[in-house]
Amino acid sequence: MDNPSRSERSRNAALDAAITIVTRDGPGRLTLDAIARESGLSKGGVMHQFRTKEAVLRALLEQQMAHFEEFSSRYLEKARETTDQPELAAQIATLKEAISTPRAGAFALLAAMNENPELMAMPRDVDIKKIALMKAEARDPDLALLRWAAARGLLLSSLFGLSSLTDAERDRLFERLLDDSKWTAIEQGATAAAKPPKATATRAASPRPVGARAAKPASARKRG
């Protein structure tokens, strides 16, 4: 009865060790031997959970994605009561939440990209589905994607130490991205621009066929 829980503890210990190694030493230092030393597990115990380094990286990605998917789902339920674009709100809020978590997630992604770029298909496929949902609910799909992309840019620049914004400035930008009322005028302008122009009340006169005689005025016909 203890085997499943012991196995899960070993798995979690290995993943925690992997995050520590990647964060402290860099992706290139992540090996099964290093995980065994850091976690206190035997190499055989590590390999019982993960046969390869790629399997460790895949598990790290899945762990990060599951954590934020859970946050997003909880936020989505609340957002449905306050906005007509709950998918967009949930995604922006999740990106904001990711900044407050340890940088291990970013380093795990970097490690995965360095080891095997094909692993990035996992989060990319999730993004494709999320983008489709955001576009489907939006009055202006392009504007919704612009808000989402801006939020993602704030996250990435912060996680990788590239942001020159203060925490307060960044938080204000996130709040603005989340506030639908700040974007209503742009949405309305886009909607108005997309409407076809009204048809003119008078139609343009049809051209006379070549050689056709113009009709005489009624007064001229009477004199004739």
Image (spheres, grey):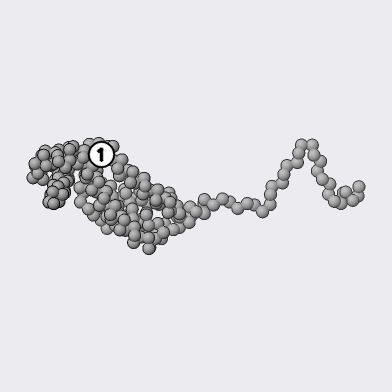
13 or 79: which is nearer to us?
Answer: 13
Q: Position of residue 140 (x, y in %)?
A: 45, 52
Q: Residues within 10 Å of mark 1 (few under 14, many from 20)?
A: some
Please name the residue shown 28% across and 55% down the image: 71
Q: Is label 1 in a helix, a strand or a loop?
A: helix
Residue sticking out furthest to the right: 224
Residue 57: which quarter of the image?
Answer: top left
Residue appearing at x 21%, y 40% in the figure: 55
Q: Position of residue 116 (x, y in %)?
A: 25, 36
* Residue 172 visible somewhere in the drawing: no
The front one of 139 and 205 is 139
The residue that disc 1 covers is 113
Residue 83 vertical position relative to residue 66 in the rendered view, above or below: below
Find residue 100 and report its image quarter: bottom left
> What's the residue type where badge 1 is placed?
Met
In the image, 159: left or right of 129?
A: left
